[in-house]
Image (spheres, rainbow, N blue to C red):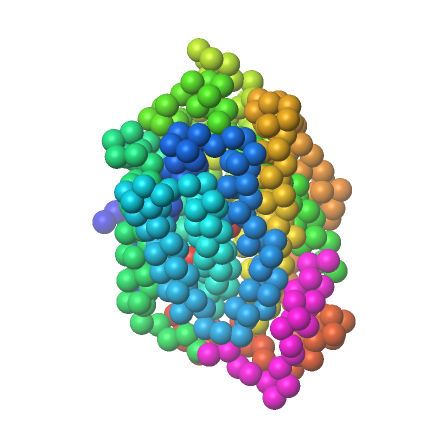
């Protein structure tokens, strides 16, 4: 090993055994997820000949849990150990995905069945994501959050490069429903890796008078809406993901029917375009330190929006390079934005509030996504798929406005974490009867010498 490599890895998460287990499980899961990301809508578009409205509904059902259960799930996750939630969620998704190939072989695959599977897997994915984000800061030092999130984002980025090509090839060879089997098997491997983690996760402390779940939900909402930094981030994500969901609802129909591309070509476009995720994940921390976290957030979401405009400009005969370039820009900007904003949120939030804060951010920022998917599908049927895609790309350009008009634009580094008295004041204002003994400050966690690990999905 070179001296440079020894210095780079000394004291890093490379030496954290349990983190490596979960990181490996997450990497395999992400690879399988990319196969499903392509195969699932292709099953509707190519095999079931879905209309734009039906494709919009398919996307909406998958995103509906963000609108319906984000808030109560966030409060619930703060009351339980997070690792068992991760195991149960991964198993639920794996088993529900098995329904698609089984139904296809049996001859009763239909759009309503795909809606149901999308709803179940969307629910499981949301719960897994929220539990993972709340799990990570309790298992690694807060100073390691950017490194941990960057490593996990690197796995997602690598999967987004390899997965679409693999998915396109599998769809072409064995059909879309059977390709989904890969994801189900990958999730079973992820479950095994989580079960092998040996670092104990203490049960959440319970006060004599624990606030009710709905009071904890109000507390989470209060955390976001009383903090201009968190509110501007939430508003930016809400705007971007609303219009992105509009685009995703009709994208597969656009490239298959309007541009005449096949599953293999779509997989190759995504694989080449997703190469942007690798430098984005690797450079996110460095860019944030060099430019400051606020300017980095503004620049990265702006890059995503500008390059998104290239997709509706693609024309038959020249579509392939335009779509690859569009995907490259989005793939670079998105991990830079997500890594920095997630690390910022985790750095300033007390451990006991992480679950409900994540749930609130999901609700505010992504709860609009199912509405966007439905609107995109409806517009695709009404004004045409291409016009709907162009409108969504223009709308995404407005997302950066929230950051530019907020204190975020002047933010160079993460503010100091909330103190215990600040957390209690927030709880009191929200009507929650929180008590000091329900909170464990970060310094207390580190003094107990507990190792920390897990993944976070942005």
Please name the residue shown 64% across and 86% down the image: 209
Residue at 69% x, 34% y: name it: 398
Q: Nearer the viewer, residue 269 or 420?
A: 269
Q: Report the magenta residues as a range.
A: 203-225
> Which residue appears at 29% of the width and 29% of the height?
172
Q: Position of residue 418 (x, y in %)?
A: 65, 67
**Residue found farthest to the bottom:** 208
The question of residue 270 being in magenta is answered with no
Task: Tell me which residue sits at (49%, 74%) in the image.
Answer: 80
Q: Nearer the viewer, residue 281 or 41?
A: 41
Whether residue 406 sits left or right of residue 417 in the image: it is right
Mark yes or no: residue 82 visible: yes
Left or right placement of residue 48 versus residue 285 in this view: left
Give how far across and how far down residue 280 sits, in percent.
Answer: 46, 39
Q: Is residue 129 visible?
A: no
Q: Measured along the vertical axis of the image, is residue 384 above or below residue 183?
A: above
Q: Position of residue 62 (x, y in %)?
A: 50, 47
Residue 212 in the magenta stretch? The answer is yes
Quarter of the figure with residue 416: bottom right
* 278 vs 430: above or below: above
Measuring from the top left, give residue 69's x and y in whole percent: 58, 60
Tell whether 384 sits left or right of 450.
right
Q: Would you identify the image quadrant in which residue 378 lies?
A: top right
Quarter of the rendering containing residue 177:
top left
408 vs 116, nearest the viewer: 116
């Amino acid at each position: 090993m070179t001296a440079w490599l020894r210095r780079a890895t000394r004291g890093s998460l490379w030496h954290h055994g349990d983190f490596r287990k979960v990181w490996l499980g997450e990497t395999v899961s992400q690879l399988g997820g990319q196969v499903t990301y392509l195969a699932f809508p292709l099953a509707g578009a190519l095999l079931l000949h879905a209309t734009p409205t039906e494709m919009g509904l398919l996307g909406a059902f998958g995103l509906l849990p963000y609108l319906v259960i984000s808030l109560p799930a966030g409060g619930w996750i703060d009351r339980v150990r997070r690792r068992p939630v991760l195991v149960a969620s991964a198993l639920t998704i794996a088993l529900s995905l098995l329904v698609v190939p089984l139904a296809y072989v049996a001859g009763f695959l239909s759009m309503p069945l795909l809606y149901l599977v999308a709803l179940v897997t969307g629910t499981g994915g949301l719960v897994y994501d929220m539990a993972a984000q709340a799990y990570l800061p309790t298992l690694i030092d807060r100073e390691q959050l950017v490194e941990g999130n960057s490593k996990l984002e690197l796995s997602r980025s690598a999967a987004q490069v390899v997965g679409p090509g693999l998915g396109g090839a599998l769809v072409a060879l064995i059909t879309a429903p059977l390709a989904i089997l890969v994801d189900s098997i990958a999730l079973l491997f992820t479950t095994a890796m989580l079960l092998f983690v040996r670092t104990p996760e203490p049960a959440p402390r319970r006060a004599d008078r624990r606030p009710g779940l709905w009071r904890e939900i109000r507390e989470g909402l209060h955390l976001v809406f009383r903090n201009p930094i968190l509110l501007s981030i939430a508003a930016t994500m809400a705007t971007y993901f609303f219009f992105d969901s509009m685009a995703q609802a009709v994208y597969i129909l656009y490239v298959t029917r309007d541009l005449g591309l096949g599953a293999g070509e779509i997989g190759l476009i995504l694989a080449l375009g997703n190469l942007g995720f690798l430098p984005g994940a690797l450079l996110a921390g460095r860019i944030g330190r060099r430019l400051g976290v606020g300017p980095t957030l503004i620049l990265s979401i702006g890059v995503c929006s500008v390059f998104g405009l290239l997709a509706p400009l693609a024309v038959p005969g020249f579509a392939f390079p335009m779509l690859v370039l569009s995907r490259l820009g989005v793939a670079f900007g998105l991990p830079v934005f997500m890594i920095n904003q997630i690390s910022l949120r985790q750095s300033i939030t007390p451990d006991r509030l992480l679950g409900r804060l994540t749930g609130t951010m999901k609700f505010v920022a992504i709860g609009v996504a199912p509405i966007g998917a439905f609107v995109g599908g409806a517009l695709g049927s009404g004004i045409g798929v291409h016009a709907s895609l162009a409108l969504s790309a223009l709308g995404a350009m407005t997302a950066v406005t929230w950051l530019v008009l907020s204190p975020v634009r002047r933010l160079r580094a993460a503010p100091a974490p909330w103190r215990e008295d600040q957390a209690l004041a927030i709880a009191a204002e929200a009507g929650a009867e929180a008590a000091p003994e329900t909170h464990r400050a970060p310094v207390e966690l580190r003094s107990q010498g507990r190792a920390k690990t897990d993944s976070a999905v942005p």
